[in-house]
Image: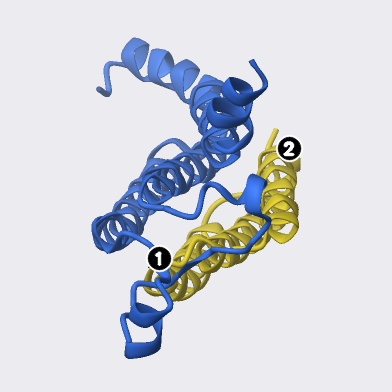
């Protein structure tokens, strides 16, 4: 029982905390009225997902038993590291998430441009006020 | 990886993330998002992902914050 708890819950604290931050960011994306707050929630959600994927390539997870006796190194291999049996992090998730960070910056830029355009059109960036103004526009026959 | 430092950084990450979504001042929220990105860069150093760490510090904390500031100069500062 203790071994099961240690193996599946305590050692994988990165996964649990990243899931918690994913829930926070996604709920902010749904609940918040302000569009900039929605975008901040979206970027927090993206970063937490990247944290989860990079944690999958993390091989030094047995540290709660050994307390740092055999921690992982960055994925650089040199002679002493091979002789002393160092373990290094899996570099594949790092590369994938490197692409993801750049794409998330690009999507944030496009979304901010759309927010500015919405403010020019409606005069507000609160969601409920925009829905009211849309109804007014429909009555006036503008849109 | 050092476990107490890792746990402390993840705790900071949670607190700063909640604070960035909680404040009503959008300028403070954007600055807190930059702080969140810096803490996340330190978490990635702890995970051995050095390349992701400096990409995050440059793109997430630098360029993204600057873009959000540029957007905030054209929309109202306070959330209702």
User: Which chain has been coloured yellow in this picture?
Assistant: B
Residue lying at the far front in this picture: please name it. Answer: A83
Q: Which residue lies at the image location 55% right of the left edge and 30% below the top edge?
A: A7
| B24 in relation to B33, above or below | above
Q: Label 2 to label 1, Cα distance in Å?
A: 40 Å
Can you say whether A9 is above or below A45 in the image? above
From the image, state whether disc 2 or disc 1 is nearer to you: 1
Q: Is residue A126 visible?
A: no
- Crowding at dot 1, Cα within 10 Å, few <14 / some 14-19 / many 20+, comes out as some
Q: Nearer the viewer, residue B76 or B7?
A: B7
What residue appears at the point 29 percent right and 53 percent down from the top-left corner? A110
Is A30 displayed left or right of A1 in the figure? left
| Chain ID at mark 2 | B
Q: Chain of mark 1?
A: A
SS category of the residue bearing label 1: strand
User: Quadrant location of the N terminus of chain B?
Assistant: bottom right
Disc ID at residue A101: none
Closer to the camera in the image, A7 or B14 = A7
Whether B1 is drawn above or below A80: the answer is above
Give the drawing colour for chain A. Answer: blue
- Residue drawn at (55%, 52%), measured in percent from left and top? B75
Secondary structure category for the residue under label 2: helix
In depth, the one of A25 and B2 nearer the eye is: B2
The answer to whether B66 is drawn above or below residue A60 in the figure is: below
Q: Residue furthest bottom?
A: A79
Residue placed under numbered mark 1 in the picture: A87
């Amino acid at each position: 029982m203790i071994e099961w708890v240690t193996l599946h819950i305590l050692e994988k604290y990165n996964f649990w905390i990243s899931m918690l931050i994913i829930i926070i960011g996604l709920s902010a994306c749904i609940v918040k009225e302000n569009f900039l707050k929605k975008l901040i929630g979206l970027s927090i959600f993206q970063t937490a997902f990247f944290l989860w994927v990079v944690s999958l390539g993390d091989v030094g997870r047995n540290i709660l038993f050994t307390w740092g006796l055999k921690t992982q190194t960055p994925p650089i291999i040199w002679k002493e590291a091979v002789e002393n049996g160092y373990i290094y992090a899996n570099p594949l998730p790092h590369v994938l998430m490197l692409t993801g960070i750049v794409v998330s910056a690009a999507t944030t830029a496009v979304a901010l441009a759309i927010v500015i355009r919405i403010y020019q059109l409606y005069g507000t960036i609160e969601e409920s006020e925009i829905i009211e103004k849309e109804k007014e526009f429909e009555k006036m026959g503008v849109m | 990886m050092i476990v107490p430092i890792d746990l402390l950084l993840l705790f900071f990450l949670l607190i700063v993330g909640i604070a960035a979504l909680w404040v009503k001042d959008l300028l403070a929220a954007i600055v807190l998002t930059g702080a969140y990105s810096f803490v996340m860069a330190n978490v990635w150093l702890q995970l051995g992902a050095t390349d992701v760490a400096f990409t995050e510090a440059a793109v997430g904390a630098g360029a993204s914050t600057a873009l959000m500031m540029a957007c905030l100069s054209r929309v109202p500062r306070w959330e209702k």
